[in-house]
Image (tube, rainbow, N blue to C red):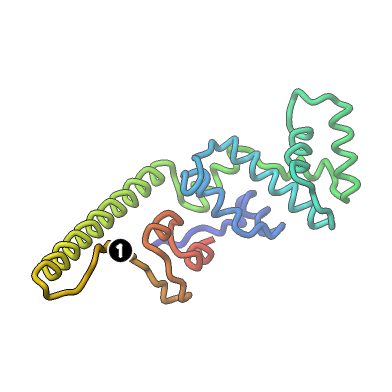
């Protein structure tokens, strides 16, 4: 397996490290590929990232943004239909949080920067998303069929034993719960949860 390039050499990766936005890189990837989220466009991801960056800068300065405050502030700073007066007010709000508006604008990333980060520094692509999803769904289908077959076999054998008087048993249901234990961290997952999450959390964190 080839070694991935240093993510901090990209603008997005550098900002993630500088502002300690743990998990943002993985979430960008998941949101683009549609893993656990509705797949988002690169432009939408750039806006999402810039809002996370703005929140991180406010919190670093000791501020605690209210619900919706960051999204509204970002809109005032980035949308073309905002009046000059509204933008001035937004910039004043930044300065009250010890954030230089000009520096912030320079740090905001474009959709091209997000694409470069994901494809060149995380090594993912839209084609991979389709492939990964297909493989996971095939695995899920195979496992579910095996579980159904196992349940049917158990039910059949128990019924035969009960009907022949060899086993005392009333009405019953057979439950098959497949658990996967990650021996690295000791966490156990139902197989469906493991597939839905894209793997064990300890391994996902190590890949970031």
Q: Picture quarter containing residue 146?
A: bottom left
Specify the quadrant that holds the C terminus.
bottom right
Q: Classify residue 148 as left or right of residue 18.
A: left
Q: Classify residue 91 as left or right of residue 104.
A: right
Q: Picture quarter containing residue 87?
A: top right
Compared with 144, 40 (above or below) is above
Could you say where residue 16 lies in the image, as x and y percent from the top left? Answer: 65, 55
Q: Classify residue 139 as left or right of residue 150.
A: right
Compared with 133, 159 (above or below) is below
Who is closer to the viewer here, 11 or 162?
162
Q: Classify residue 179 as left or right of residue 185.
A: left
**What crowding class fits label 1: few (fewer than 14 Cα within 10 Å), some (14-19), or many (20 or more)?**
few
Which residue ends up furthest to the left in the rendered image?
164
Could you say where residue 163 lies in the image, as x and y percent from the top left? Answer: 11, 66
Could you say where residue 202 lies in the image, as x and y percent from the top left? Answer: 50, 68
Total marks drawn? 1
Q: Residue at x 44, y 44 (%)?
A: 125
Who is closer to the viewer here, 8 or 167?
167
Could you say where residue 116 lies in the image, as x and y percent from the top left? Answer: 54, 44
Compared with 9, 88 (above or below) is above
Q: Name the element at disc 1.
A: loop
Compared with 94, 205 (above or below) is below
Q: Residue at x 16, y 74 (%)?
A: 167
Specify the quadrant that holds the N terminus.
bottom left
Q: Residue at x 53, y 64 (%)?
A: 205
Who is closer to the viewer here, 156 or 81?
156
Q: Residue at x 28, y 55 (%)?
A: 144
Kindly identify which residue carries mark 1: 175
């Amino acid at each position: 397996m080839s070694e991935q390039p240093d993510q901090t050499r990209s603008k997005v990766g550098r900002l993630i490290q500088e502002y300690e936005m743990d998990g943002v890189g993985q979430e960008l990837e998941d949101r683009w590929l549609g893993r656990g989220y509705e797949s988002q466009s690169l432009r939408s991801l750039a806006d999402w990232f810039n809002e996370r960056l703005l929140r991180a800068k406010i919190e670093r300065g000791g501020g605690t943004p209210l619900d919706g405050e960051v999204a509204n502030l970002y809109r005032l700073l980035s949308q073309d239909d905002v009046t000059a007066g509204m933008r001035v007010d937004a910039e004043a709000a930044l300065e009250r949080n010890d954030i230089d508006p000009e520096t912030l604008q320079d740090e905001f990333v474009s959709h091209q920067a997000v694409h470069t980060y994901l494809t060149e520094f995380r090594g993912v692509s839209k084609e991979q998303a389709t492939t990964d999803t297909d493989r996971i769904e095939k695995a899920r289908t195979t496992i579910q069929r095996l579980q159904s077959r196992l349940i049917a076999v158990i039910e059949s054998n128990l019924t035969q034993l009960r009907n022949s008087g060899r086993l005392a048993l009333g009405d019953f249901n057979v439950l098959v719960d497949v658990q996967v234990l990650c021996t690295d961290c000791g966490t156990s997952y139902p197989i469906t949860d493991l597939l839905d999450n894209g793997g064990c959390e300890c391994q996902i964190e190590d890949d970031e």
